[in-house]
Image (tube, helix red, strand yellow):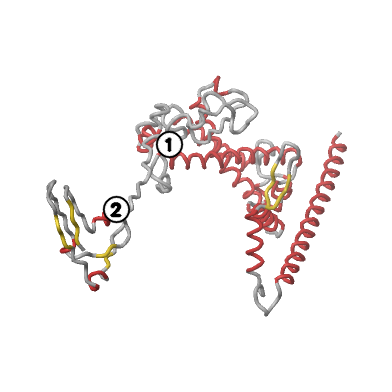
């Protein structure tokens, strides 16, 4: 091949590989030619094509992938929900000014406006202390009713409490335990927690929010679990969010336990035995709940509420389930229609069982209400 030019020419053979990540053919040195010609001169260049052997040599060019990981934040940025006008927890109310999502567990719930009247850090400290005690109590209360000897319990197997009453031993034990809690409260209520090991980390995490660190920090992490998810501010905030999100239902649950037993005189482990004793009803209900949510969805429209419809993912899930059944797609065993009919019968039996369980608990509730009414009438 001949090339003739009368101006400045630059011939770069084989340079296209610099702009592509696909495999290239290695060219011989004779074919990689760069010639510059002055204007007004004629150039005649002969390029030798590569041989067949040379053309078949293939070199895999490595592909450099720049995995640019997002840099971790050095501190928590304030105002996560600052641009929201409405509360996340109560959308019909405006978002409280101080609850902008900067702190763990902050979803804008303050219908009584306490954050405008009281110190936010003090309230966070009180909440997390009560939450931790409640998480211990909500496990200990039913556990005592299940395993403690009768002489340690109150009438009808109820756990000893302020509303249920005490016997001398349980009263003494309660005084000692809460005395220890009071001593801890006295020694730590005015503590400075920004100079401890975890306190310094929290101060750095919260430097853009305030200078107080994190409420509820006792520098207690003997198993070093705090940074297992990630050693960065958002991961630590996530763990604190998990803690308070469990503590809030625990505070509601332990309050319910106490008032229920005080009002009815029956232990929660007896009244709600499905949650505390082995049975088939609770696993079936749990399976039904997850299966329903995997196949169906409930939506509300501007005209109707609680509209149940099957999702496209649910259709695919059922189809895959149908194909995975024994005999599906083969001539042996049960046919897919027979298997689906069997599953339908099983689901109907399960539904019948759940209805019987519901009727049983409804009858028990009516009997209990009748029993309570008679007792109240006799007390009068």
Q: Find residue 35 and report its horizontal and vertical position in percent.
A: 14, 54
Pointer 1: what residue? Answer: 218
**Relative to the observer, which residue lies in front, 233 or 269?**
233
206 shown above or below 358: above
Please say if the residues under marks 1 and 2 sit with CB atoms less than 8 Å apart: no
347 shown above or below 260: below
Q: Residue at x 42, y 26 (%)?
A: 210
Q: Residue at x 17, y 48 (%)?
A: 7
Visible in this render: residue 222? Answer: no
**Relative to the observer, which residue lies in front, 288 or 380?**
288
| Distance CA(mark 1)–CA(mark 2) | 58 Å
Give the label on residue 19, or none: 2
Q: Find residue 112 and report its horizontal and vertical position in percent.
A: 62, 24
Q: If the image is split into quadrants, where does the C terminus sit?
A: top right
The local secondary structure at tag 2 comes to: helix
The reply, left or right, for residue 291 in relation to residue 376 is: left
Q: Quadrant of residue 43?
A: bottom left
The reply, left or right, for residue 113 in relation to residue 200 is: right
The reply, left or right, for residue 308 in relation to residue 98 is: right
The local secondary structure at tag 1 comes to: loop
């Amino acid at each position: 091949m001949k090339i003739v030019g009368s101006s400045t020419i630059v011939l770069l053979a084989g340079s296209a590989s610099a702009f592509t990540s696909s495999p290239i053919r290695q060219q011989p040195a004779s074919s990689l030619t760069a010639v510059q010609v002055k204007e007004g001169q004629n150039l005649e260049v002969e390029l030798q094509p590569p041989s067949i052997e040379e053309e078949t040599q293939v070199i895999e060019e490595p592909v450099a992938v720049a995995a640019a990981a997002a840099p971790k934040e050095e501190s928590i940025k304030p105002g996560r929900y600052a641009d929201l006008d409405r509360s996340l927890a109560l959308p019909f109310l405006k978002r409280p000014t101080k609850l902008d999502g900067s702190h763990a567990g902050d979803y804008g719930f303050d219908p009584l406006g306490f954050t405008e009247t009281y110190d936010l850090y003090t309230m966070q400290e009180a909440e997390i202390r009560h939450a931790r005690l409640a998480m211990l109590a909500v496990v200990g209360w039913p556990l005592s009713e299940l395993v403690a000897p009768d002489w340690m319990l109150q009438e009808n197997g109820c756990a000893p409490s302020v509303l249920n009453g005490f016997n001398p031993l349980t009263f003494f034990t309660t005084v000692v335990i809460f005395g220890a809690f009071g001593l801890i409260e006295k020694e730590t209520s005015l503590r400075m927690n920004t100079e401890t090991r975890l306190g310094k980390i929290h101060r750095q995490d919260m430097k853009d929010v305030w200078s107080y660190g994190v409420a509820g920090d006792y520098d207690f992490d003997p198993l070093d679990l705090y940074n297992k998810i990630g050693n960065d501010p958002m991961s630590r905030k996530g763990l604190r969010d998990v803690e308070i999100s469990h503590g809030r239902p625990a505070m509601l649950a332990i309050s319910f336990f106490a008032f229920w037993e005080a009002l009815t005189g029956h232990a929660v482990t007896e009244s709600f035995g499905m949650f505390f004793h082995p049975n088939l009803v609770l696993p079936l209900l749990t399976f039904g709940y997850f299966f329903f949510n995997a196949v169906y969805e409930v939506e509300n429209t501007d005209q109707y509420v609680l509209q149940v419809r099957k999702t496209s993912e649910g259709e695919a899930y059922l189809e895959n389930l149908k194909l995975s059944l024994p005999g599906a797609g083969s001539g042996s065993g049960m046919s897919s229609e027979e298997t689906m009919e069997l599953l339908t019968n099983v689901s109907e039996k399960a539904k019948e069982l759940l209805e019987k369980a519901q009727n049983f608990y409804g009858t028990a509730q009516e009997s209990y209400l009748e029993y309570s009414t008679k007792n109240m009438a006799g007390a009068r």
